[in-house]
Image (spheres, helix red, strand yellow):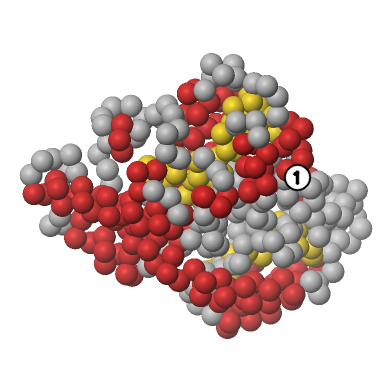
Amino acid sequence: MKKYYFDHVATNPLDPVVLEAMMPYFKEEFGNPLSVHAYGMTAKNAIEEAREKVAGLVNAKPSEITFTASGAEANNFALRGIALARQNEGKHIIVSRMEHHSILNAARFLEKSGFTVTYLPVDKQGVVDPETVRKAIIKETTLISVTHASSEVGTIEPIKEIARIAKEHNIIVHTDAVASTGNIPVDVQDLGVDLLTMAAHQFYGPKGAGALYVKQGLRIVPLIYGGIQESGRRAGTENVPAIVGMGKAAELAKAELGKRMEYLRPLRDRIIDSVAGIPNAILTGDRQNRLPGHASFCVEFIEGEAMLMLMAAKGILSASGSACSSKALKSSPVLLAMGVPTGLAQGSIVFTLGMGNAIEDVDHLVTEFPAVIRRLREISPFAQGWGDSQEGGTCVTG
């Protein structure tokens, strides 16, 4: 059976051009970048070339890019590193309720370590109002972290406006741009942020490679201690093949960004327009201001897991909630923060597109999805009025 992959927010296939660039560093160019001989110098030069390419993707200086093993590591590095570096100035940080678990759990760790955390509310589209940021700031606030775009509902946040408010109070700003970097324009100078997280596999690079942009001159405490790698900010022998792959993927993303966005938007809109005709199946997130390949919904009277299984039987592979929480079998905290009732939040489904998707793939999806919903509603006690429908409620995110 043919498989139709609509889970690109979880990960993307490795671009063959990226794999080709990586291959020599698995075999003949195997040196440790800290070695002073020819093998080491070749590896070191490859890392620095990759650093330039990643910096170019987000309009940063190469020296401002620190490689990590993932976006989650970079998020932890940003929150814990800045909080600890500035704790003498204040021990209050601000994050949104739309954040990835690597941000929220790092914030909870800091709370247990004596910090105070304010969790910003969002509106029904999942947007953080910059004015709520302004109101949350106190004298002891040292760091604000708000995601650039939600991997779960696709909404793009007003980071530029949030950063402008933060700068009025000399507060450091971090944004988790894992879902957006390589998929929409991301410019650290234009956004005005001090730190920005990215991950290679979100733009057709390898897993196991991430990076944190740290504005020049900003002091940050390392997350991993040991050696002098990454200018002393991140110890451990570098994963040279993965870093090279991230650099090549960044180079391709920068060159092809406009083409990718132009290709994905009509496919996304075809899914959204089709689902709009299904009763009680409502788009989650902002309709216009969203990632170009992202379509997410909440479907009344049906659980997300059931939809995933029946869609998979049709060869359609998608997600329910974020990639890190879809196996938890509980309501998405992102949807709950947007005001979606608990029962209804369990009926979420997310379709994310990539350059490997063709119009025929989307046609298959929009044909089979309504049939799956009809089938599940036929056997749903809530759809038949047998259960307590109050918990289901009405989706408020449209």
State the residue position of label 1. 129
Q: Secondary structure at mark 1?
A: loop
Instruction: Please name whichever residue, 215 or 243, is drawn nearer the observer in this view of the structure.
Output: 215
Amino acid carrying label 1: it is Asp
Residue drawn at x 53%, y 16% is 88
Q: Is residue 264 left or right of residue 65?
A: right
Please indicate, yes or no, whether residue 150 appears anywhere in the rendered image. no
Q: Residue at x 26, y 60 (%)?
A: 22
Q: Position of residue 234 (x, y in %)?
A: 34, 34
List x then y, in percent, for residue 194. Answer: 52, 40
In the displayed structure image, the side of residue 191 where residue 38 appears, left or right: left
Q: Quadrant of residue 375?
A: bottom right
Q: Nearer the viewer, residue 188 or 144?
A: 188
| Image x and y of residue 15, in percent | 37, 68
Q: Nearer the viewer, residue 58 or 364?
A: 58
- Whether 197 is drawn above or below 79: the answer is below
Q: Residues within 10 Å of mark 1 (few under 14, many from 20)?
A: some
Q: Residue at x 25, y 39 (%)?
A: 237
